[in-house]
Image (cartoon, rainbow, N blue to C red):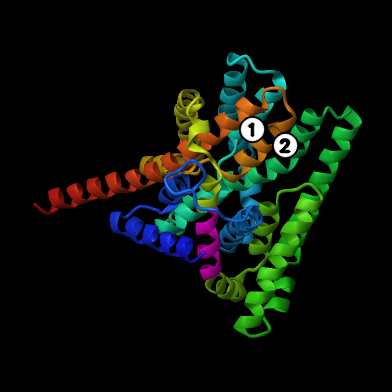
Amino acid sequence: MGVVALALAAIGRVAAWVRITAVPLYLIAGLALGDGGLIGLRVSDGFVELTSEVGVILLLLALGLEYEQSELRSGLRSGVWPGVVDMVANAVPGFLFALILGWGWQAAVLLGGITWVSSSGIIAKVLRDLDRLAFRETSTILRLLVIEDLAMAVYLPVAAALVVGGTPSEMLLSVAGAVAAVTAVSAMALHWGDHIAALLGAGSDEALLLAVFGLTLLVAGLAEWVGVSGAIGAFLVGLALSGSVGERAARLIAPLRDLFAATFFLFFSLRVDPAALAGAALPALILAGVTMLTKIGTGWYAARRDGVGRGGRLRVGTALVARGEFSIVIAALAVGVADGAGLGALATAYVLVLAVAGPVATRLVDTLATRRLARYVRTRLT
């Protein structure tokens, strides 16, 4: 663990030196340290799973703390149509690609989900690292992420039922339970958030930190128990803590978030054998190229509807490129599918490509925008 922590520290310094987010460097380091890599670091599987889950949960909690309840209400009202466009534009290429590869319709449905949903965890980390949380177009990004995450509450039970071959009544019951759970937690966050914040914020900073951390893990665990993503529950907890209590919680939770988020990205690729990705590399690159363009187009469209300028539209599109935790969860469902082995390898390579390409593309857009601004200022001054 000491070696891992020091490695993460070194990676963070390198990322700060070259002025990019550390996410792609964490992923590449995980490949080098894992089985089949250069070193082959041995860690407990239970520890890897636990830290990865806590990392995603704290990333989404921090994202919720930055998102006001009023913004969520308006986002859910105005973000449905962009969410539909996002689903069609990004899920259809994955579905068709699976059919082209000769896979069955079950694998096609799963691959469509993998290419559809962006990584809330990676995007939250990138937005924070690049100081974009106060940008005008960030609300557009968050709105699409919320729509996607809430849609996953319905998609995942449906996908699981398709894989296990459930009856229509069983599938309907599973979907109804997931929708009811999301609705209940959302209502609690939106209508009782002030009371929850007042209850938690009455004590010291130590008490607030423990209360927020415990409540977040509890809600995330209950959400997963009823078939909803724990990330949704964590996001809604963050959303419920508004005002001064939310600001205190964001400050106190930041060190834990950074620690567990770093281990999440490192250990995600630590479990991947580089040799197993060789056969899926070319299909993954083709699919990643196509869906990178469709995701940028989706972000451009959604930002234009919000009145964002061209530079902001491109920033929205590139920020949404990264795929991650949800895509891996969907790929895990493929164990019971006839084409599950091929789908798992393709999904892993695909996620790794876009988990690296997304943050890098986002940083490049910022660099190009800064250079254009500098040229414009020099021109006006001369």
The foreground one among 136 and 21 is 21
- Residue at horizontal 35 percent and vertical 52 percent from the top: 20
- Residue at horizontal 52 percent and vertical 44 percent from the top: 35
Residue 254, x across and y down, in percent = 52, 68
Disc 2 residue type (three-letter): Tyr
Residue 229, x across and y down, in percent = 71, 49
- Residue at horizontal 38 percent and vertical 57 percent from the top: 11
Q: Earlier in the sequence, mark 2 or mark 1?
A: 1
Residue 179, x across and y down, in percent = 79, 45
Is residue 136 a member of the stretch shown in magenta? no
Q: Is residue 339 left or right of residue 136?
A: right
Q: Residues under labels 2 and 1: Cα distance?
A: 8 Å
Residue 115 seen from this side: no
Question: Label 1 near label 2: C-beta < 8 Å?
Answer: yes
Disc 1 residue type (three-letter): Gly
Quadrant in the picture for residue 212: bottom right
Per the rendering, the mark at residue 155 is 2
Label 2 sits on a secondary structure element that is helix
Magenta part of the chain: 254-264
Where does label 1 land, which residue? 113
How many other residues sit within 10 Å of disc 1, few (<14), some (14-19) or many (≥20)?
many
Quadrant in the picture for residue 235: bottom right
Which residue is outermost to the left?
A: 382
